[in-house]
Amino acid sequence: MYIFSFESFLDFIQIHYFLLSKPNFKKRLFSLFVLFFVVASVFAQSPTIISATGVGESPGTTAQITGAELEGLNYSNSTGLYSWVVPQSGLYRIKGVGASGGGYDGRTYNYSDTYRPGFGAIIQGDFYLVQGDTYNILIGQKGEEMTGSSYAAGGGGGTFMVKSNNSPLVIAGGGAGGGSGGGDAMKYLSGGKDGSTSTSGNTALAYNNYAGESGAGGQNGQEGSYGKNSYNQDWHAFPGAGFYTDANATSDYGTPAKSFLNGGTGGISSSYSDGGFGGGGHAKKYGGAGGGGYSGGGGQGRHSPGGGGGSFIDASATNINTSNGLYDGTAVSNLSSYNFGNGYLEITVLQS
């Protein structure tokens, strides 16, 4: 792939300036066309990358924006949300990336690793957006790491781009937190712990034969549920929040994750791992927490990871791409990739 840089651009200009000095008109004209289309295509395809601003359940105070400058984009350090007023009507590519669940001790994980937390989903589509419309953007943050070798991790937050009338455009589900203890914590390779490419959140992964202790994923923008075990209430983790509703948790075990409509704060644990901003669930001792998203992922009651949060893309989208080549069970283009770490959102101007 050709890598464009300022130095290579200068070299390109010098070569074409030399050609333009020659008397052959056709060469001069052709050279001008090549120069125009190469430069135009490079700049037209450079995305604006909007990144997470904080760590854990709450956002930071300073915007994190890289790549191409995007007119009309602002950040509120009181809410942790970006707002964007569409500067010109046209075709835009939106790529939403959910955050991963928490792992252990600051480690970096690959998708193929046997033991890993849930990774965030990636949802992309092209949209015709109208000048003057306003969108609110929440960037999911990674679930809090395990607090010790014996304890589980928080769920990752979803990444949201939502019109000012609270109509979602793109939502990418967060990955579940890894479980702890029991010998096989975080081992399960099923995609259930990763952010879902369906509107429903994923059910927490069953530990051995204890399927009844796996909380179900939410549906239709609702929160997930959590599974309980027969030993101790301290064992289970809590689900992720959905777009519309907060996660459910008993008050004596922390503060449940909040929905996008209620601010998107991750679940807060009194003694263990918090969920990520974007509705990630909080953990207690052993079960992995659910990821946040359009619908929340389920919380686990014993040792294994929770369920990933659900995703959403508006029906007006064209050229849809997802992490696994499916959206709500329908085949779309396959990115073959999930995200580890904080979430982010890319906006690329295709035509305006």
Image (tube, helix red, strand yellow):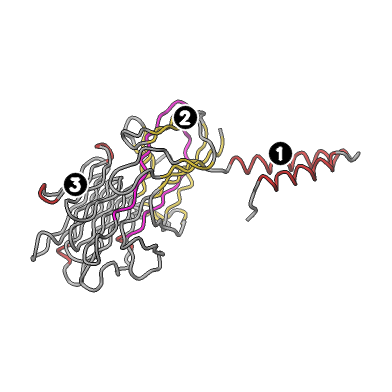
Looking at the rendering, in which quadrant would you find the N terminus? bottom right
Q: Say what amino acid the circle numbered 2 marks.
A: Gly
Q: x, y (%) of residue 311? A: 34, 48
Residue 273: quadrant of the picture? bottom left
Pick out the residue farthest to the bottom. Answer: 183
* Residue under numbered circle 3: 256
Q: CA distance from mark 1 to mark 3?
A: 54 Å
Q: Identify the residue at horizontal 47%, vertical 29% (top origin).
A: 72
Position of 334 relative to 268 (above/below): below
Please, what secondary structure does the residue beneath circle 1 have? helix
* Residue under numbered circle 2: 72
Q: CA distance from mark 1 to mark 2?
A: 27 Å
Decide if residue 216 is in sight here.
no
Answer with mark 3 or mark 2, whichever residue precedes in sequence: 2
Looking at the rendering, in which quadrant would you find the C terminus? top right
Answer with mark 1 or mark 2, whichever residue precedes in sequence: 1
**Which portion, as a residue range, is magenta?**
118-144
Decide if residue 180 is in sight here.
yes
Please, what secondary structure does the residue beneath circle 2 have? loop
Q: Nearer the viewer, residue 320 or 147?
A: 147
Asked whether the residues under the numbered discs 1 and 3 touch, taking CB atoms below 8 Å apart as contact, a structural biologist would say: no
